[in-house]
Image (cartoon, rainbow, N blue to C red):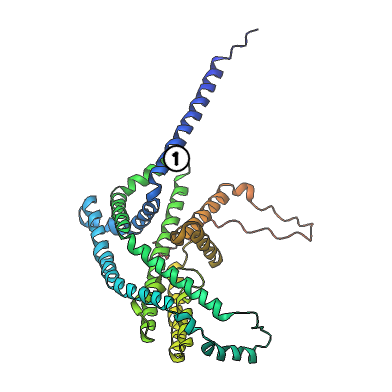
């Protein structure tokens, strides 16, 4: 009996082996490429995000320069450097001396027994007595306030000193990453359309699905970066003004408050709360009350007004989901998670919408049985417009 496989079977088997081998080579190539770009991955992603934000400006410049893509990209990058980078460098140059003085003063205060004097019984006793009289259900006998607050102040001071030393010690590394960022933006602006078309060619999705993913990520990137950074700058300026009024280094602590505003929920309270307590323990109750009111009303009010305006429609999800994804992004990626969290949320929402559209016939709700009085109403079908209705009002349009 002849057991030799047929010619068609041999061809099919050879084709499967070729496909598997090609797939393994592709995975190997992608893994090797990832290993090479991993040290610069965050810079590449930020370059792609900034390029997507600046791309409409690039198109306007290209139209004015009669289609010259190289000059248009250089003009956009020059405007970015002149309008943003140079003012930031001047600000940092003015900030470094004040920051070094502040960090040195904090270190001297910590090593000189400043917290022990601040947290002495003479300063804490009036407040502890008020708690005993008005809040008798709180047992203060088992709480060592002086030791706890002393340890907290030391930890905060050491963290601040380490952060400042890290920033100053890695200035050259930051400069190199910035140059790489400009280089990435230049090529993505100049050849971005061709790059996107290449990715879309390799993607097996339909063109409208690919466009939906790209537009959703672009809208979120603009909302998060433009909105988040502008709100942080405004809060930092307002917080620095309040700090300067009460006699604290306004430029330094305003900058710290700007970074703290990027932290969800607590935000600038991480800075002005301890500062108000410090002024209160120092006997400057007027300054403490002013700083608390200024920060909770003016600084926090700016966040409440500006952030919803910039973040409106950024991902089509509730504030709860945005908050959870930002927290998860901070945990997984550090400060870059503030950008990655909303982007991942937007990608997830778009993919869920595409899934619902692709399998809507299977997922369609069944009609209610009129004979069954206990039948529950069917769920609503998925949003056919994606995570954000294309009304043209989003910050990415």
Where on the picture, by quarter, is residue 30?
A: top left
The correct choice, above or below, for 90 with respect to 57 in the image is below
Q: Residues within 10 Å of mark 1 (few under 14, many from 20)?
A: few
- Asked whether the viewer can see residue 289, the reply is yes
Frontmost residue, 259 versus 27: 259
Q: Is any part of residue 386 visible from this angle?
A: no
Q: Position of residue 339 (x, y in %)?
A: 44, 60
| Vertical arrangement, residue 313 with respect to residue 45, above or below | below
For image coordinates 50% across by 24% down, the residue present is 15
Residue found at x 59% / y 11%: 4
Foreground pick, 340 / 69: 340
Instruction: Provide residue 348's location: percent of width, then percent of height.
Output: 52, 54
Residue 47's spot in the image, x, y percent? 35, 54
Residue identified by numbered label 1? 31
- At a point 40% along the width and 79% down the height, the residue shown is 239
Considering the numbered disc 1 on the image, is that residue within a helix, a strand or a loop? helix
């Amino acid at each position: 009996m002849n057991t030799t496989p047929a010619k068609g079977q041999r061809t099919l088997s050879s084709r499967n082996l070729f496909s598997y081998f090609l797939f393994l080579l592709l995975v190997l190539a992608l893994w090797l490429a990832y290993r090479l770009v991993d040290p610069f991955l965050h810079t590449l992603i930020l370059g792609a995000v900034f390029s997507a934000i600046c791309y409409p400006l690039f198109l306007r410049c290209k139209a004015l320069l009669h289609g010259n893509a190289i000059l248009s990209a250089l003009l956009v990058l020059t405007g970015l450097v002149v309008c943003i980078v140079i003012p930031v460098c001047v600000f940092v140059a003015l900030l470094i001396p004040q920051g070094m003085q502040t960090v040195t003063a904090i270190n001297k205060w910590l090593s000189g027994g400043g917290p022990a004097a601040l947290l002495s019984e003479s300063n804490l006793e009036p407040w502890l007595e008020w708690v005993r009289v008005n809040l008798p259900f709180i047992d203060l006998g088992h709480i060592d306030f002086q030791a706890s607050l002393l340890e907290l102040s030391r930890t905060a001071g050491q963290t601040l000193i380490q952060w400042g030393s890290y920033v100053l010690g890695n200035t050259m590394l930051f400069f190199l990453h910035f140059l790489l960022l400009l280089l990435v933006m230049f090529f993505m602006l100049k050849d971005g359309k061709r790059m996107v078309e290449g990715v879309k060619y390799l993607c097996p999705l339909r063109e409208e699905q690919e466009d939906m993913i790209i537009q959703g990520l672009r809208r979120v990137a603009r909302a998060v970066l433009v909105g988040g950074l502008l709100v942080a700058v405004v809060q930092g300026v307002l917080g620095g003004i309040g700090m300067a009024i009460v006699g604290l280094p306004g430029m330094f602590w305003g900058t710290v408050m700007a970074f703290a505003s990027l932290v969800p929920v607590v935000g600038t309270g991480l800075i002005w709360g301890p500062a108000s307590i410090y002024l209160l323990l120092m006997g400057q109750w007027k300054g403490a009350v002013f700083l608390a009111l200024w920060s909770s009303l003016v600084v926090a009010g700016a966040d409440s007004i500006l952030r919803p305006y910039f973040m409106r429609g950024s991902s089509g999800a509730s504030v709860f989901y945005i908050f959870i994804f930002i927290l998860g992004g901070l945990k997984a990626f550090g400060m870059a998670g503030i950008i990655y969290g909303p982007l991942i949320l937007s990608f997830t929402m778009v993919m869920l919408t595409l899934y619902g559209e692709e399998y809507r016939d299977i997922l369609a709700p069944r009609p209610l049985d009129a004979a069954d009085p206990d039948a529950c109403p069917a769920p609503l079908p998925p949003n056919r417009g994606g995570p954000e209705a294309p009304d043209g009002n989003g910050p990415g349009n």
